[in-house]
Image (cartoon, rainbow, N blue to C red):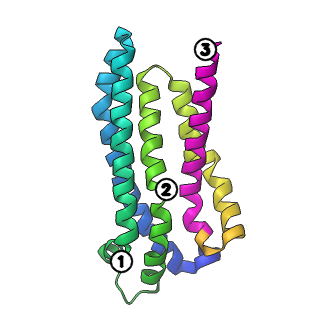
Amino acid sequence: FIHYLGEAGVAAYSVACYCFPVIFMMANAIVQSGQPIVSFAYGAGNQTRLAEARSMMLRWAVTTGIVVSVGMFLCSDYVTMLFLDATEPAYSLCIEGLPYFGLGVLFLTVNIVLVGFMQSIEQASRATLFTLLRGFVIVIPTFILLPELLGNVGVWLAIPTAELITLLLIYLSQKVLTKRNID
């Protein structure tokens, strides 16, 4: 951030970092609400109830992700005002950047819910893999490459891009697992 946006950029991005735990907690609340149902249905072999619970959790994740993404897009100035004074250079950078960062909230909430679902059905290795991918393995290259390709906007899109790539990998891995079960 300092390289692309200077110290003001670091201060601006810290607002996104302050919002991140709140967003994570919303997604985690969905997971923790659904996990007992999912675990019980999985243990009982009730595939219908398992699918219903997964669907419900994903609907809430998508709804939450869309609402928060739209909120960050439409209200980036209000969110910024909570943390920064309008006279600071970081203020305008934050208002411009938060909508880009907000694009990833939908992917983040869905990823957290899918990882929580995997944990509930004894797929801890897959859950750990995708957690490492989204939080470390993929995000580092996106923070390096996207600013080079997109400039300042790339800095704000690094985490949303890592979340999107992780979601696509989860989807593709599920397709592979489903195909193996059919064959």
Q: Earlier in the sequence, mark 3 or mark 1?
A: 1
The residue wearing badge 2 is 104
Taking 85 as reference, is 52 above or below it?
above
Residue at coordinates 42% horizontally, 33% vertically from top-left?
A: 116
Task: Say whether residue 124 is magenta.
Answer: no
Which numbered disc, 2 or 3, marks the residue that appears first in the sequence? 2
Report the amino acid beneath label 3: Ile
Q: Position of residue 173 (x, y in %)?
A: 61, 30
Q: Which residues are magenta?
A: 154-183
Q: Give coordinates of residue 118: x percent, y percent.
A: 47, 27
User: Which residue is disc 1 drawn over?
Assistant: 77
Secondary structure at numbered mark 2: loop
Q: Earlier in the sequence, mark 2 or mark 1?
A: 1
* Label 3: which secondary element: helix
Nearer to us of marks 2 and 3 is: 3
Residue lying farthest to the top in this orientation = 44
Amino acid type at image mark 1: Asp
Residue 69: x and y in percent read 40, 60
Amino acid of disc 2: Gly
Q: Nearer the viewer, residue 37 or 138?
A: 37
Q: Nearer the viewer, residue 176 or 23?
A: 176
